[in-house]
Amino acid sequence: MTTISPHLDSKPHGSQAAGEIDNAGDDPRSRDELITGGQTFTSVTDTIAGITLRPTPKPWLFAFALSSTMLAMMTVSLLYLFTTGVGVWGNNNPVAWAFDITNFVFWVGIGHAGTLISAVLFLFRQNWRTSINRFSEAMTIFAVCCAAMFPGVHVGRFWLAYWLFPIPNQMGMWPQARSPLLWDVFAVGTYASVSLVFWYMGMIPDLATLRDRSKGRFSQFMYGLFALGWTGSSRHWHRYERAYLLLAALATPLVLSVHSVVSFDFATSQLPGWHTTIFPPYFVAGAVFGGFAMVLTLAIPCREWFGLKDIITLRHLENMGKVMLATGLIVGYAYTVEFLTAWYSGNSNEQFLFMNRPLGPYWWAFASMVTCNIIAPQFLWFKKLRTNIWVLFIVAMFVNVGMWFERFVIIVTSLHRDFLPSSWGQYVPTYADLTLLAGSFGLFFTLFLLFLRFLPVIAMAEVRWTLPQAHIGHSKHGYPSAPAPAEPAPIVDNGAADEKVFAVMAEFEDVDGVIAAANKVRTAGYSNWDVHSPFAIHGIEKAMGIRPTYLPWITLTCGLTGMFLGLFGVWYANATSFPGLPATFTGYQFLISGKPIFSLPANIPIIFECTIAFSAFSTVIGMLALNRLPMHYNPVFKSDRFRRVTSDRFMVVIRSQDPRYDAVATPRFLQGLGARHIEVIRD
Amino acid sequence: MAHHEHKNHESVVSTLGALRGRLTTFFLVAAVVGAGAAIFEASVVADGYRRFMMAYVVAFAYVLSIGLGGLFFVLLQHLVRAGWSVQVRRVPEAVAASLPIMILLFIPIAFTVLNGKGEVFPWARPVSAAAHHVEKPVPLLAPEGEAGEEHADAHADVHADTHGETAKVDANAGTEEPKVDIHAIAAAETPEHQHLDQLTLKKRIWLNPNVFIIRWVVVFAFWTAVGAWYYRTSGKQDHDGDHRHTIHMETASAPLMVAFAFSISVAAWDLLMSVNPHWYSTMFGVYYFAGAVIANFAFTILWIIGLSSAGALPKTVTVEHRHDLGRFLFGFVFFWGYIAFSQYMLIWYASLPEETIWFKMRGATTVPGHASDWCYVAIALIFCHFIIPFLGLLSRHVKRNKNALCFFAVWMLVVHAVDMIWVVMPEMGPGLKIGAVEIGLIVALLGVFCATVTTLLARHNLVPMQDPRLDESLALEGLY
């Protein structure tokens, strides 16, 4: 996260119409404030943590009952499928892929907006992403769960789905690394796990907030367990921020690769309508397009029901509308180029296919696709419509539908007319197809509702950081510090006298105050000390003298290791043969579409995914290890006041082990820095 | 709350001043030298006239890509309301506004399209050149009836089956398979011997000289109007300080960006893809776009560093701005790699002969008997256009170091030129054609273009001093 200057997102909102604060202003002279309603660190924390910590609301129970009923329907449908066979679907020859793969691509695509928001917008310093990244990431993970189910059950004997993984089986067979379907396993697998880690890592500071605010023993224990002993230490924040940046930089090519690899499933074939080189970027744009539609579908009701209108503001919604329009236009460009090229190619099969889509038996699917994906988003050109919640919501719904139809059109219309007219066929979905599609929404919403109930819905730490008062120099830009205390802060010592002093802690209320204090502590020569804050204060490294972490080197080393392991793995699995070894330990040499046994272009996707997976995991593990986390016991937790450090307070903590520490002088010194409260912690 | 009055920033007043004359002279001298070298070599090598015309298309596409990249940058910055880039925007603005000079430089291309010879664009010959006997399958790449028996075999093999079902040339060539010397066929494809084949005739509505000229009149009108409008409007703001100029430029940028996407695709198809009228790839417009954006960022970085070093730019343009430009360069190096790999991999994997032939002519093949000198270029592109700059620009220290960033900017401009050569020149045959003709023409056109950029840059302050978002650019500080 970086900023240009603390005071830029700060113009207070102008008008308030129909219950919506309009902060989507176009005046280039100053940017509207991002978070409205004069929020403070405290109010942001209260609002967001409150959603999770209050008793279960009735409407939630109702929604949960509804979604779990749909989930039950999916379970029944799956049982029917497992006990009877894939024949219960409408799939046939030539339409061997139908609803299953359509749903798979649809759900994988939905996931893309989450990573786009948390990674790509992060790299582009789009601070508005902080209000929506958390639940977009959650959406990503749940969507990938729904997606992964479809190819898993489409294999027929789903109990043999482990054949997809690089495990040698009793027949000496290895998965085929030159097949795009295996690339999918690696791409979606890496994507799911890296997204999960990204999501979890982003949540650690917020879980700590919930740990420090929840009242029940069980919830304290659970949040505490997963918060890993987070204390908001600036030294931790420094590595955390670096890890976040590295993950964002890794997730960006990863998200490009996932839908590109999905598109390779189709585009590597020779089938007209599938084999076209623009598929990779076109699929990625379409995925982001559909993903943002789903984010809007979820965000609009959530902000309404949970009272989040000051945090997910009109500007956030408008920006999402703009992204949807932009990606929708990229999709429109791809449609146009595809049609034009089909004509330009002079290939009569291509031409037939592209005329068959609008004019053939599936014309209605094509018409739905064009209406929903091309026509509907055009309304978003107009600011009046774009900032109208209802218009946005309806357009998003259209896009959700349209993106499903797009995949249906690509898959089914390309297949149902084979090269030989004698092999033409037709696909009609059965009840098993329809219930599984509807049921996957049940799975998605059930998981999402659980997330809404038990986890921090919005990235509190990041939203706090987007407030203008979170930046160094805020007091010069209209966000004054709290007035200095009239008399020196009291020095409290609650510990038993026989315990050794662990540290002395000074509390501050604002960033400029704690930065000034940090500068003085550093210049006074202390070395074993820390500043704890509810968000990463940018620039505190300078005030505290924190040296840059070497975490990037860990990432690079592990990334290269992953790359070579991936390369070795595909070579070993498909191209080796050691005489004398049992078949289990030799490569499975199998000729596939005339490709050489070891063939680099076809192996690059897997090597790439291995590189990303190793780098991403090592980044998170490295960050935790360098921060000595998890550390569930920490004497600072004994202080009740310290709990506010994960909400709205700043603490300077000087350890008694510091060579300059003095039982009398050090608390006095902290008093002189303008602290509100001094506390001695014993252990 | 923080309301800050907009002030006239004295600190950013800066002009090109005396540099203008020196730069213009330098660029024009370079242009003359380059053109001289190209004409000299073209007059001594075999088939020099055709090679000169093809190299001219390369140079034109190359310089145009820089201009279009600049236009893209200007549109993009307004589209996303960027603040950081305000101080570095004048260079791309001048680059975009220099696009009209390309109309002048287009004259030789119009000539080669309209002269009915089809030196560069085989489709540009009149329909009367069409082969009328259609009972036999019409070979795509070779003159009919003139080839020997060995060639006749080859034709049967490379004959692009327009139904895409059977022919499969890219399989591992076994020993018994006939060797297909496509380069010999391509070399035989001199304009005098070549007929307009059936497949090209099918595309006559698109690939015909008059429609080509109409398309280019339209795209040039569009680029000229947009480039000039942004240049003028931004310049006007320096004098009147009216923030509404910014609103207008932002509002217009969205629809213009859509039109831009189609216009650059037309450029890519017409200039580069139609050199081989049979071949097609839906990705091709994006491929050219990726190169154009790289070229523009490299070009802008060089200007910014050059102007800073010469003391022309104010000190407020700092390492942070260069770092951001470097990040974009890095990002688009990756994007190019992604697009180039995807395009290659999909064509290689599906192995349809009418598509693979394009890569085969360019040496991107490992099939025995098909290697040519272009193989070296194809492999060099993988390393020099992607892997080396990717690894090189990965580190923030490189992006923040003036000399290192400068090095990679020059590097990218050079490899982008090689890329353009690689896309066009193999149509002339297997021999490597990177010589004084190609390099000289690139230098010549680039020189003319840069001289235009210099002239336009000199007319405005080097920093948009009244831009309402200037404060953000001045306050830019990087925290990672």
Image: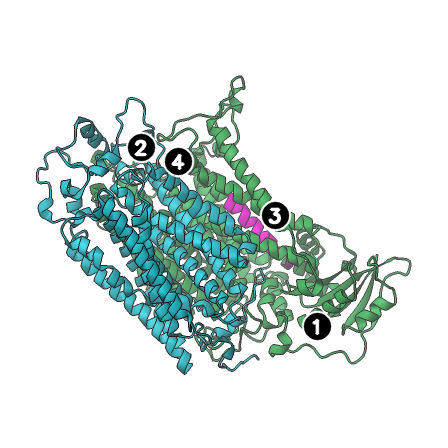
- Mark 2 surroundings: few (<14), some (14-19) or many (≥20) residues within 10 A: some
Please name whichever residue, A342 or B109, is drawn nearer the observer in this view of the structure. Answer: B109
Q: Check disc 4 and report the residue beneath it.
A: A86
Q: What stretch is highlighted in magenta?
A: A190-205
Which residue appears at 36% of the width and 62% of the height?
B27
Co-location on one chain, circles 2 and 4: no
Mark 2 highlights which residue?
B370
A11, above or below A159, in the image:
below
Asked if the stretch drawn in magenta spans residue A200, the answer is yes
Q: In this view, does B119 lie to the left or right of A315?
A: left
- Near mark 4 (Cα within 10 A), the count class, few <14, some 14-19 or many ≥20, is some
Q: Indicate the chain on which mark 3 is placed.
A: A
Q: Position of residue A198 (x, y in %)?
A: 57, 52
- Dividing the picture into quarters, in which one does residue B30 lie? bottom left
Residue B470, compared with residue A561, is above or below; it is: below
Kind of residue at badge 1: Gly
In the picture, one chain is green; tell me its letter.
Answer: A
Residue A216 visible to the viewer: yes
Relative vertical location of residue A386 with respect to residue A655 in this rendering, above or below: below
**How far is the residue under mark 1 from the one under mark 2?**
72 Å
Task: Identify which amino acid the numbered label 4 is placed on.
Answer: Val
Picture disc at residue A553: 3
Task: Tell me which corner region of the image, top left, top right, bottom left or bottom right, holds residue B263.
Answer: bottom left
Instruction: Identify the residue under disc 1.
Output: A513
The chain ID associated with circle 2 is B
Of the two numbered discs 2 and 3 in the rendering, the one whose residue sits closer to the viewer = 2
Mark 3 or 1: in front is 3
The chain assigned the colour cyan in the figure is B
Amino acid type, label 2: His
